[in-house]
Image: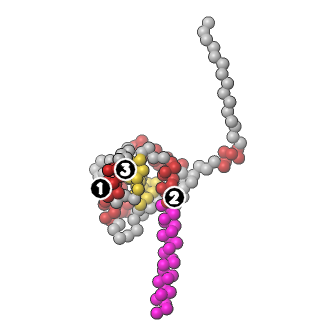
């Protein structure tokens, strides 16, 4: 009466040490990140991905909120969706760039499902620093944020040296 099946499954057991050695967070909580994304699901995905990487981020639900947030407080990175209501990501990027003309500005990266050469050119022409396609891979996002962190360290380290050189030049005159 009926059919019966038998099967065996073998699992590898990880030791407590192996589990503890697995990195959970790779990022620096000091990097200030703004995520500009209108889609609730994409918001949760990006914020959770960043959290698992060791970053915290603020959220803007559209381009207008992104402009307001980026001009109200300092961000190192803005992860900008392109298609958003009210003000799209390209327009928001232009507005943020205009606000920071000549000054230290956040690095803005497009986060979009559009991946044609023309789409990339449009983003770069708007003033974006890079381009991430959805779904965003953890590896690419991690590499992108690490590059931003490195550039911030280089900028910070160069400032005292430059000041010291200028001071020495003036003192010697």
Q: Which of marks 1 and 3 is nearer the N terminus?
A: 3
Please tell me which residue is depicted at 61% across the width and 11% down the height of the picture: 3
Q: Earlier in the sequence, mark 3 or mark 2?
A: 3
Which structural element holds mark 3?
strand
Residue 146 is tagged as 2
Instruction: Using the numbered discs, state the Cα–Cα distance from disc 2 to disc 1 in whole angstroms.
Output: 26 Å
Q: How is the image coloured?
A: secondary structure
Quadrant including the N terminus: top right
Q: Position of residue 97 (x, y in %)?
A: 34, 63
Q: Can residue 125 be seen in this view?
A: yes
Residue 81 is tagged as 3
Which structural element holds mark 2?
helix
Q: Is the magenta stretch mostly helix, strand or loop?
A: helix
Q: Where is residue 22 in the image (x, y as percent from the top left)?
A: 63, 48
Q: Which of marks 2 and 1 is nearer the N terminus?
A: 1
Please tell me which residue is depicted at 51% across the width and 53% down the height of the picture: 142
Q: Are marks 2 and 1 in contact (CB under 8 Å)?
A: no
Residue 91 is tagged as 1
Magenta-colored span: 148-173
Q: In this rendering, would 128 be left or right of 33? A: left
Q: In this rendering, would 127 be left or right of 12? A: left
Q: In this rendering, would 31 be left or right of 86? A: right
Note whether 103 is above or below 7 in the view shown. below
Q: Residue furthest bottom?
A: 173
Please tell me which residue is depicted at 49% across the width and 66% down the height of the picture: 152
Which structural element holds mark 1?
helix
- Mark 3 vs mark 2, foreground winner is 2
- Mark 2 vs mark 1, foreground winner is 2
Q: Position of residue 79 (x, y in %)?
A: 41, 53
Label 3: few (<14), some or many (≥20) within 10 Å?
many
Q: Can residue 67 be seen in this view?
A: no
Residue 163 is tagged as none
């Amino acid at each position: 009466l009926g059919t019966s099946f038998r099967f065996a499954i073998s699992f590898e057991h990880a030791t407590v040490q192996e589990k503890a050695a697995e990195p959970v967070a790779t990022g620096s909580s000091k990097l200030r990140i703004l995520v500009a994304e209108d889609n609730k699901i994409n918001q949760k995905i990006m914020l959770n991905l960043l959290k698992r990487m060791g970053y915290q981020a603020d959220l803007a639900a559209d381009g207008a909120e992104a402009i307001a947030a980026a001009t109200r407080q300092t961000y190192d990175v803005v992860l900008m969706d392109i298609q958003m209501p009210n003000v799209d990501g390209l327009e928001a990027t232009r507005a943020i760039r205009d606000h920071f003309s000549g000054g230290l500005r956040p690095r803005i990266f497009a986060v979009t499902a559009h991946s044609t050469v023309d789409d990339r050119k449009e983003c770069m022409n708007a003033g974006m620093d890079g381009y991430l396609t959805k779904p965003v891979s953890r590896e690419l996002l991690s590499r992108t944020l690490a590059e931003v962190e490195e550039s911030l360290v280089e900028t910070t380290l160069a400032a005292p040296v430059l000041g010291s050189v200028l001071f020495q030049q003036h003192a010697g005159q």
